[in-house]
């Protein structure tokens, strides 16, 4: 799987998560729901965004490496 395909799947999954949470919120509107969102959903959504940004940076580095902008090392790092 390419990096861009992985980013697409991550975005799709995050979108589905937000949509499903929106549906849940229609029926679950108490203090427990607020705490669940604060303790679980909000951090998860933030982490997903961080991972998406990191994957984009990796994708850019891979593209640069393939195009010769970044010299490829001839020996593995120690």
Image: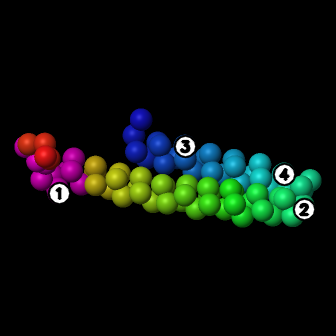
- What residue is shown with label 3? 9
- Mark 1 or 4 closer to N-term? 4
- Mark 2 or 3 closer to N-term? 3
**Front in this rendered view, residue 53 or 66:** 53
Q: CA distance from mark 1 to mark 4?
A: 47 Å
SS for tag 2? Answer: loop
| Residue 77 numbered tag | none
Residue 75 appears in which quarter of the rendering? Answer: top left
SS for tag 3? Answer: helix
- What residue is shown with label 1? 69
Q: Main secondary structure of the magenta part?
A: loop
Disc 2 or disc 3, which is closer to the eye? 2
- What residue is shown with label 4? 24
Q: Quadrant of the N terminus?
A: top left
Q: CA distance from mark 1 to mark 2?
A: 54 Å
Q: Residue 30: where, in percent of width, then height? A: 90, 62
- Mark 4 or 2 closer to N-term? 4
Disc 1 or disc 3, which is closer to the eye? 3
Q: Residue 72: where, in percent of width, then height? A: 13, 48
| Residue 30 numbered tag | 2
């Amino acid at each position: 799987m390419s990096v861009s395909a992985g980013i697409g799947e991550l975005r799709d999954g995050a979108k589905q998560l937000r949509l499903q949470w929106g549906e849940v919120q229609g029926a679950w509107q108490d203090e427990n729901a607020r705490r669940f969102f604060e303790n679980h959903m909000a951090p998860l959504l933030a982490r997903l965004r961080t991972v998406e940004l990191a994957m984009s940076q990796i994708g850019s580095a891979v593209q640069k490496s393939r195009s010769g902008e970044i010299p490829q090392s001839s020996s593995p790092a120690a």
